[in-house]
Structures are given as structure tokens and as C-alpha cells.
Amino acid sequence: MIFDTGLKIDDLNSGPFKKITIEKEEIVIGKKNDRIFAFNNICPHKGASLSKGSLNGDNIVCYMHGYEYNIFTGKLEKMKSWKKDSTWVEQNDQWRYSGNLKTYKVHIDRDKILIELGP
Ligand code: FES
């Protein structure tokens, strides 16, 4: 189903991205190199708010543990290692596991940004 985000393309010129809520889903929308991206705000690792993170190239970097996901494809690109000094024990594989980030298909209707939710 396609929803109007209430945003226009020019709204994305200020700041790296905006966070909106549609149908109880928190969605981060932004523009990079004239391409619009939209992804779910919930980090697939442990649920942190990705809108508190920052961009590193085409990746969003989660502020919580530093995992990086591609903002266009959702692919998990980097998993930070948690080994620190000699006192730190590497977290186990189950803790480290993360799926990919959920992304959304974006449509443009004149200058309005629409988003596709659901199957
Ligand atoms: S909650 Fe996002 S990297 Fe862990």
C-alpha cells in the first residue's frame, strides 16, 4: 500500500534525514546524491533508534553498537568488534547477530514523497 509521507523533496534538503511515523512504523527518510532512501528506524541488531545515528557514506551507523547498514539496500555492511583491551570478552555469536535493515520503496508524485508499506 502506498502512503503520502507528508514530505516534499525540498524538505530533505536540511539535515541528513527526517523521521516520520506511518501506520505505527517509524521510518527514516533522507536524500543522498539526489537519491531518496527510506528505512525502518529500529536497528535490526538490538532495537536502537537509527535516527540517532549518523551517515558514513551510504551507510547508517547505529549509535548503540556501531553496526552499519546500507541506506538503499538495507544490507548489513559492518559489524564492529567488541574486543577491547585485555579486560573485554568478545560477545558471543548470538549476541552479535543482526539481520539486514528493512527498507521501503519510495515513489515521487510531482514533488511529494510517497512510500510503499507492506507486502
Ligand atoms: S542496537 Fe544497533 S548496533 Fe546494536
Image (cartoon, rainbow, N blue to C red):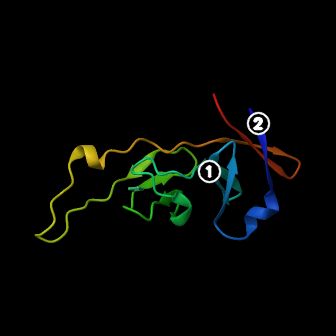
Three-letter code, disc 2: Ile
Above-or-below relation of 62 to 26: below
Question: Residue at position x 37%, y 45% from top?
Answer: 98
Looking at the picture, how far across and down is residue 77, in whole percent?
41, 50
Q: Residues within 10 Å of mark 2 (few under 14, many from 20)?
A: few
Which mark, residue 2? 2
Q: Residue furthest front?
A: 24
Above-or-below relation of 93 to 117: below
For the residue pair 2 and 9, the one nearer the viewer reads as: 2
Taking the image as shown, residue 118 lies to the left or right of residue 95, namely right
Secondary structure found at label 1: strand
Looking at the picture, how far across and down is residue 37, in whole percent?
65, 51
Above-or-below relation of 99 to 12: above
Looking at the picture, how far across and down is residue 31, in whole percent?
68, 58
In the rendered image, which quarter contains the N terminus? Answer: top right
Q: Of circles 1 and 2, which is in front?
A: 1
Q: Quadrant of residue 88?
A: bottom left
Name the residue carrying label 1. 26
Q: Determine the quadrant in which ligand 1 lies.
A: bottom left
Three-letter code, disc 1: Glu
